C-alpha cells in the first residue's frame, strides 16, 4: 500500500501472525465502525514481529487515548502499558493484566527501564505502548526511556503518528536502535514531521513544534480535553 494514501476501509495492511493479538471479529468490527463514524482512517504497514516498543505522538489531548484504543482494537492488537504496581490488587489487578498492563515499582533498583526490559525478556510477544512526551501539556523534551527500553531489550521501535487535520493514524517503519540516541531521535522526528498534527497546537512538545514549524508554548494551561 502506498504509505502516503490512507486505506479507505479504515484499517492498514494485514496484521501478521507474529504480532501480539487480542479480540475477535466482533470487537474489531465495532472499533472499525467507530473510527469510520468519527472520520478517522489508518495508514501504513504493521510489522509482523512479536516484540516492539510502540510510541505514539503528538500527545496533547485525552482524545488521543480514545483514538489509540480504538485503533488497537480495530487491528486486534494486544498492547501493554506501564502502570504502578500498587494498582494491581484483587479483581482490578486481574483486569489490568488482561488489558496488557505491566506492573512497575519505581522503588526497585532496576527502575522503569529495567523492569520493562525484564518484561520483554519474559514475554513471547509484547507490544509496549509508550507516549514519550510524558504529558499532554507542552513537554520541553521527550523522555528517552522508550529508546533505552528498546535498546536494552533488543527490540525495534515502531512510531505511530496522529494527525487531527487529516484524521489519520499512521504507522511508520520499525526502527532498530543504534549507538547514538540523538541520531535515532532525529530519524523518529523526521517521521512525525511528515505525518502528525496535534489536536491542541499550544500543548505540543518542543520537538514536535520544531519539526512542524510551530511556536512552542511552555507552561500552557492544564489540559482538560
Image (cartoon, helix red, strand yellow):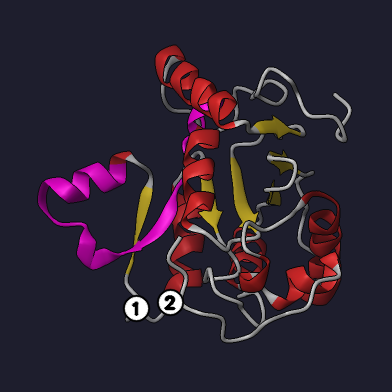
Q: Is residue 126 visible?
A: no
Foreground residue among 157 and 11: 11
Q: Report how far apart the C-alphas of labels 1 and 2 lie in the structure.
A: 5 Å
Mark 1 = which residue?
Answer: 108
Determine the residue positioned at 85% across, 23% down.
1
Element at badge 2?
Answer: helix
Element at badge 1?
Answer: loop
Q: Is disc 2 surrounded by few (<14), some (14 to 19) or many (20+) residues within 10 Å?
A: few
Report the residue that reaches farthest toward the left: 90
Dot 1 and dot 2 residues touching (CB under 8 Å)? yes
Mark 2 = which residue?
Answer: 111
Determine the residue positioned at 77% across, 34% down.
44
**Is 75 a magenta residue?**
yes
Q: Which mark is residue 165?
A: none
Determine the residue positioned at 50% across, 50% down.
63
| Image spot of residue 195 (x, y percent) | 80, 49
| Image spot of residue 73 (x, y percent) | 48, 30
Determine the residue positioned at 86% across, 60% down.
190
Q: From what the image shows, is residue 121 above or below residue 148?
A: above
The residue range painted magenta reads: 73-97
Foreground residue among 157 and 193: 193
| Image spot of residue 106 (x, y percent) | 36, 77
Amino acid at each position: 500500500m502506498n504509505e502516503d494514501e490512507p486505506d479507505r476501509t479504515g484499517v492498514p495492511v494485514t496484521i501478521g501472525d507474529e504480532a501480539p493479538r487480542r479480540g475477535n471479529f466482533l470487537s474489531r468490527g465495532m472499533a472499525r465502525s467507530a473510527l469510520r463514524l468519527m472520520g478517522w482512517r489508518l495508514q501504513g504497514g504493521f510489522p509482523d514481529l512479536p516484540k516492539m516498543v510502540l510510541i505514539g505522538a503528538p500527545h496533547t489531548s485525552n482524545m488521543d487515548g480514545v483514538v489509540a484504543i480504538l485503533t488497537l482494537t480495530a487491528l486486534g492488537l494486544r498492547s501493554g502499558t506501564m502502570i504502578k504496581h500498587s494498582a494491581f490488587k484483587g479483581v482490578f489487578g486481574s483486569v489490568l493484566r488482561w488489558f496488557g498492563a505491566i506492573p512497575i515499582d519505581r522503588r526497585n533498583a532496576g527502575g522503569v527501564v529495567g523492569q520493562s526490559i525484564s518484561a520483554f525478556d519474559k514475554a513471547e510477544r509484547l507490544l509496549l505502548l509508550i507516549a514519550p512526551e510524558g504529558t499532554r501539556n507542552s513537554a520541553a523534551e521527550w523522555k528517552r526511556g522508550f529508546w533505552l527500553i528498546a535498546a536494552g531489550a533488543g527490540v525495534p521501535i515502531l512510531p505511530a503518528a496522529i494527525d487531527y487535520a487529516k484524521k489519520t493514524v499512521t504507522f511508520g517503519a520499525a526502527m532498530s536502535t543504534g549507538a547514538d540516541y540523538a541520531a535515532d531521535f532525529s530519524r523518529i522526528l523526521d517521521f512525525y514531521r511528515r505525518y502528525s498534527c496535534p489536536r491542541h497546537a499550544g500543548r505540543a512538545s518542543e520537538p514536535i513544534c520544531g519539526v512542524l514549524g510551530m511556536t512552542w508554548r511552555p507552561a500552557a494551561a492544564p489540559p482538560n480535553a
